[in-house]
Image (cartoon, rainbow, N blue to C red):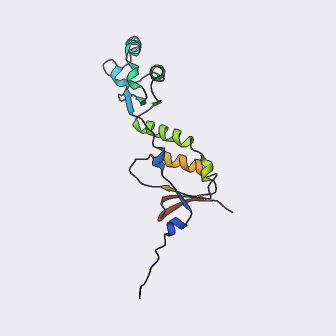
Amino acid sequence: MEIQENIVNKVAQSGLVTLDPASFYPAGDRVVYDIAANLFQGLILREKDFREFVKTHDWSQYQGKNVAVTCSADAIVPAWAYMLLANKLAPYAAEVVFGNEDVLETVLFIKNINNMDIEEYRDQRIVIKGCGEVPVPVSAYVELTKKLTPVVKSLMFGEPCSTVPIYKKRD
């Protein structure tokens, strides 16, 4: 007598849609430009010297790159200095932000999330994947939650076999 067992994939039958935040991972090289290299004696920014640097520096090396502009030194840097850098980087860089690598990642993820078509998730039961190969900033999970909550039937975090409920639309 042959016993045949049917294995049923309940996750596949659940109607859950898995959304991997890593799919919003921004392409491109990341570069941090630290204005500390332009400080006189590591303390102050001298306008004349800085303007000369800005004028003669080869900005084309940032072509297509995502650039975070920051200052690692404990110095007071006037806002106009960052504005000059942004002005020179803008024609070349894919993105320019003020801040460190984490700020850059956040801005890039949020930019991609804001460009997503949320209509494909309307009235769906969504699981936002919680782990993977690509590091995803918490800010991306927050942005996805804000973006999806108005349109989905339910929103969960984790894996389809083990989820944490975040939101459920009231009928």
Q: Which residue lies most toward the front here?
A: 1
Residue 83 in the image: x percent, y percent?
A: 48, 21
Residue 163 placement (x, y as % from top left):
49, 62
Relative height, residue 106 to residue 142 (above, below): above
Q: How far across and down, in percent of the image, does residue 15 sit?
A: 57, 63
Determine which quarter of the picture holds residue 48.
Answer: top left
The image quadrant where one finds the C terminus is: bottom right
- Is residue 11 visible in the rendered structure shown here? yes
Q: Nearer the viewer, residue 1 or 81?
A: 1
Q: Position of residue 149 (x, y in %)?
A: 60, 52
Q: Is residue 125 above or below residue 84?
A: below
Q: Nearer the viewer, residue 83 or 156?
A: 156
Query: Viewed as shown, does residue 121 lie left or right of 94?
Result: right
- 111 or 41, which lies in front? 111
The residue located at (35%, 20%) in the rendering is 38
Q: Is residue 43 visible?
A: no
Give the residue furthest to the right.
171
Q: Of 76 and 13, which appears nearest the observer? A: 13
Instruction: Name which residue lies at 48% across and 44% down.
Output: 24
Quadrant of image for the N terminus: bottom left
Question: Residue visible at 33% across and 22% down?
Answer: 37
> Which residue lies most toward the bottom here?
1
